[in-house]
Image: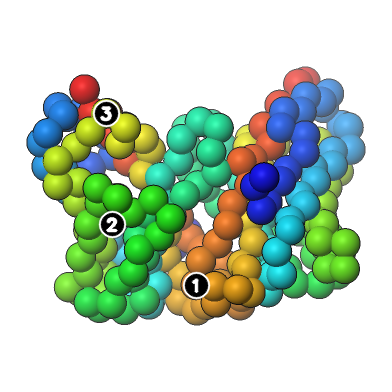
Amino acid sequence: DAGITQSPRHKVTETGTPVTLRCHQTENHRYMYWYRQDPGHGLRLIHYSYGVKDTDKGEVSDGYSVSRSKTEDFLLTLESATSSQTSVYFCAITSSPLSTDTQYFGPGTRLTVL
Amino acid sequence: KNEVEQSPQNLTAQEGEFITINCSYSVGISALHWLQQHPGGGIVSLFMLSSGKKKHGRLIATINIQEKHSSLHITASHPRDSAVYICAVTPLRVGTDKLIFGTGTRLQVFP
């Protein structure tokens, strides 16, 4: 298994509070991704990174920000959590563009916003 | 209409049956991925293919680029194959660093 961890694994928070999710990898992979998974939807890309300090938005980026100051860590921040951000969040990594390499997924973080 | 469609959405089978899950897509792609998500959430990549067929154990994935269609087959299904199977494509139009996902096919195999 690829060395990829997420923390926390579960979190319950209240509307309006800031939340930061951490993705940590030991594979030295260049590309890192944050997805959310909701019933009735496929995995949807929130933000991704193609290198240290290089990030870009995905299809559902509103209300989220990211930072990548080290190769191994990719942080996802909800500045002011809302109930619509209740979801399961997955981090993924890959070493090469996705035409030539597969993604390796973290175990997921279940976030509940009350 | 989603750019990646899977069928069926739900599938039940008896142990030992041959399973087929289908994926159709409407965009040009450089690769197609099949993923497996077990109850409890972990997602594992099963195959990445851009042409032809790949086989791993009892799993076989095929793709027809001209018809924009892929199938995942499971031979001699077993209850441990119960999972959600997800198809995803690497579209040509936005480069090679993003995936578009289908909504998944939930498979239950009963003993």
Q: Which mark is residue A83?
A: 3
Q: Quadrant of residue A73?
A: bottom left
| Chain bearing mark 1 | B
Say which amino acid is labelled 3: Ser
Q: Are marks 2 and 1 in contact (CB under 8 Å)?
A: no
Q: Which mark is residue A23?
A: 2
- Mark nearer the viewer, 2 or 1: 1
Q: Of the residues under marks 3 and 2, which one precedes in the sequence?
A: 2
Q: Residue at x 27, y 28 (%)?
A: A83
> Picture coordinates of residue B110 (x, y %)?
76, 21
- Mark nearer the viewer, 3 or 2: 3
* Looking at the image, residue B42 lies above or below residue A48: above
Badges 3 and 2, same chain = yes
Q: Please name whichever residue, A65 or B87, is drawn nearer the observer in this view of the structure.
A: A65
Say which amino acid is labelled 1: Asp
The residue tagged 1 is: B97
Badges 1 and 3, same chain = no
Say which amino acid is labelled 2: Cys
Q: Please name whichever residue, B58 or A75, is drawn nearer the observer in this view of the structure.
A: A75
Q: Residue at x 23, y 61 (%)?
A: A66
Q: How far apart are the alpha carbons under marks 2 and 1?
A: 18 Å
Left or right of A2, for residue A56: left
Q: Quadrant of residue B17?
A: top right
Q: Residue at x 77, y 52 (%)?
A: B24
Left or right of B51, for residue A65: left
